[in-house]
Amino acid sequence: MGLELLFPEFLLAAAALLLPGTYLLHRNARLCGQLAVATLAVALSATWVQWFGEGLVTPASYFGHLQIDVFSQLFKFAFLTIAFVTGIVSLAYLGELPHRPEFFTLLLTATLGMLIVASASDLLTLFIGLELAAFSSYALVAFQKRDDGSTEAGAKYLLIGSFSSALTLYGISLLYGLTGTLSIASLAAHNWNSDFSGALFVAILFITGGLGFKVAAVPFHAWAPDVYQGAPTPVTAFLAAGSKAMGFVALLRIFVVALGSMLIEWQLLLGIIAIVTMTVGNLAALRQQDIGRMLAYSSVAQAGYILAAFPAMTELALGGAIFHTLVHAVMKGGAFVIVAAVGIAGLGYGIDGYRGLAQRSQLLALTMTVCLLSLVGIPPFGGFFSKFWLFYGIFQAGMAGQQWLLWLVIAGVLNSALSLFYYLRVIRNIYTEDPQGEARPFGEHTRYPALAVLLLLILLIPLEYDYLLTLCRDAAASLL
Amino acid sequence: MIPLLHYVLFSSTLLLIGGYGVVRNRNAIVVLMSIEIMLTAANINFVAFAEFWHDMGGQVFALFVIAIAAAEVAIGLAILLSLYKQRDTIELDMLDLLRW
């Protein structure tokens, strides 16, 4: 088996090692940032070529630790795109701050961790990927070390994050003890001998605790608002889009693939967590004044919608969940790009800062509005399509037998209606109020990512949803 | 030969001690140490189960976890140090800037 499918991983690892060296030789921080962004662009196009150019006929397995299949290629592509956009926005956001080469090195290693999670076929590889991404993100969150908020957010993220990864690790060790294997494929094939095992349920509780933290599911969501508010905004975008998707990838690999035969052990648990998560997230978002915190709680709510697809365990529901995970990355990432742009322009991070944004920049105002309406799931925009298929998949599974799944759909629809309130508050500020105070002009660096997000949400996803959904359903089918 | 159950009891005791330390302590360094104890608990499980199943996978995992724990402490201390430089304290009760 050739190693060419792992080219993006090798490239990122090499670049992460070479970048600090380049800085030591040339002392040119700007060059380092551009090199990192260029590396991500090359890795992204390599994944694109491998995916569409040659096609993926059979999954490629590497020593039983890594496996490249449709699912992993889809998410590798998504993670590299997110990192690339984060890199471009960071170039503008960081300006002339010191230690920029370290920032971009950490961005590369975090992305590498996510790529490893996307193609892990072994609990050891999965855990190492999760930790590599997590450690890099702790440092990225605390990057502005002269800033009180950033350091505090980093410390909170670090302590809560390593606590929850210790829980995951203990859960994995119990799972290993019960089955004697770490390979996801062998776990899936394991003969459990009984319908319900108490020991396995304890292991599942531990793993849910740890991965629930990654996707910010209630009751493990307490870090999200603090970190989203305190971290440098491009890092927030990276976490909201990338780290969350990574959590779902890990959840899908462990629950749907490895423990798919023991559905009965975790079905109800994840269902309850889903309903509580979406409700708590939306209710808490209603009263936020800081845009970062508001989007963080909305992100918690979205995690609830996606988690609702897990108990259904059908190809359509999981395909919808994967689709919504990816579209959520676009919407949330896009929203945070605008937040970064408004922040760079000196308008602050409160919802008040968005007053009269439409008069300052039509493009940014429109993109923010489309992102927020997409997050609610208003029809013509991208978010509607993914949310529709997500809920329709669960609905179908509910009609096909498991009646209680219908409650998940009802809770999801009611919650979406509820979420409209707090998004509309921002949109009203953008269009009906007059701008207050002076602002610096918005730079090119944020204008192009904003335009790309806008085109994705109003053109590409609505027009091509059929193709994208098929892609996501293929990925889901490769899991089941 | 020590029975497997003893290892599991030992490791769950360690996990509880670590978890108690994380929840009850107000000093960030002690919390970090408690998290290390939790990682050790998982490690003991891995090694004991590897012996039980005659499978090297668990022992390899334990070695990786030791490396991961070391990296975690390095990053943790770095972040806590920069927190200390700003505030002259690492009491967790003082982390109240970001709250609604």
Image (cartoon, coloured by chain):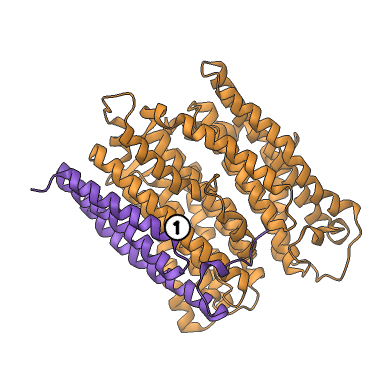
For residue B35, what is the image quadrant?
bottom left
Seen in the image, is A100 located left or right of residue A333? Answer: left
Seen in the image, is A358 located left or right of residue A82? Answer: right
Task: Identify the chain drawn in orange.
Answer: A
Q: Closest to the observer: A132 or A179?
A: A179
For the point 44% across and 60% down, which residue is it? B24
For the point 47% across and 57% down, which residue is it? A161
Q: Position of residue A85 (x, y in %)?
A: 61, 58
Seen in the image, is A71 located left or right of residue A383? Answer: left
Vertical placement of A390 versus A112: above or below?
above
* Residue with the mark numbered 1: B23
Most distant residue in the left direction: B1
Under tag 1, what secondary structure?
helix
Q: Closest to the observer: A185 or A443?
A: A185
Q: Position of residue A227 (x, y in %)?
A: 59, 60
- Residue A263 seen from this side: yes
Q: Where is residue A447 in the image (x, y as percent from the top left)?
A: 73, 60
Q: Closest to the observer: A395 or A210?
A: A210
How many numbered marks have been drawn onto this rendered protein structure?
1
For residue A355, what is the image quadrant?
bottom right
Vertical placement of A465 versus A17: above or below?
above
Task: Determine crowd level at label 1: few under 14, some 14-19, many 20+ residues with C-alpha closer than 10 A.
Answer: few
- Chain B colour as displayed: purple
**Could you tell me which chain the residue with mark 1 belongs to?**
B
The amino acid type, in three-letter code, at marker 1 is Val
For the point 39% across and 71% down, which residue is it? B74
Seen in the image, is A474 located left or right of residue A303? Answer: left
Q: Closest to the observer: A446 or B83?
A: B83
Vertical placement of B87 versus A76: above or below?
below
- Residue A78 seen from this side: no
